Amino acid sequence: MANDPTITRRGFTKSAAIAAASVTALVSDGAFGGQNPALTSAGQAEVDASVSTIIRKYGNRLTDPQKLDIRRIMTDNQKSLEAMRSFPLTNADQPANVLKIYPDGPISAAAHHSNADQK
């Protein structure tokens, strides 16, 4: 079967499962991209405040593993926030993309009514 060029459904599924498991193992071990940098003291304080607010509001409904997941998720979110906040941006900076509802200009009222009559 090693020399057979055809791909069966079973073979494809097995290969896809092995690939997904190896990527998951790499990501969980930190080998894929390394460890994220530690939070700043202000970032850690923000995470602590957010977690304590969530625990105060919903703590009686959450299990201990869920509380740990909340801390992990909030820490990951804070790392992303710190990366975005470190990007220099002022109010004078133009947006990268501009939404154009009418790419060739607005539709006139007469053209709009004639399109509606054709339907």
Image: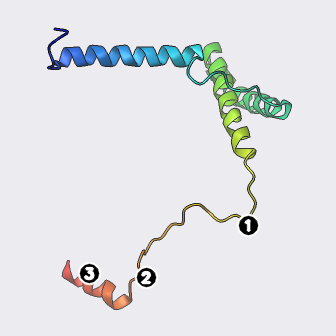
Q: Determine the secondary structure under disc 2.
A: loop
Q: Residue furthest front?
A: 3
Amino acid carrying label 1: it is Ala
Of the image marks 1 and 3, the number of the one nearer the N terminus: 1
Side of 11 relative to 96 (left or right):
left
Q: Residues within 10 Å of mark 2 (few under 14, many from 20)?
A: few
In the figure, residue 5 lies in which quadrant? top left
Q: Which mark is residue 92?
A: 1
Q: What is the three-letter code of the residue carrying label 2?
A: Pro
Which residue matches tag 2? Answer: 106
- Sequence-first disc among 2 and 1: 1
Vertical order, 95 against 22 (above or below): below
Q: Are marks 2 and 1 in contact (CB under 8 Å)?
A: no
Q: Decide: is 19 above or below 110.
A: above
Q: CA distance from mark 3 to mark 2?
A: 16 Å
Q: Position of residue 79 (x, y in %)?
A: 70, 33
Taking depth in this image into account, of 106 and 47 the one nearest to the observer is: 106
Q: Quadrant of the C terminus?
A: bottom left
- Which residue does the numbered mark 3 point to in the structure image? 116
Where is residue 38 drawn, in percent x and y? 76, 25
Q: The N terminus is located in which quarter? A: top left
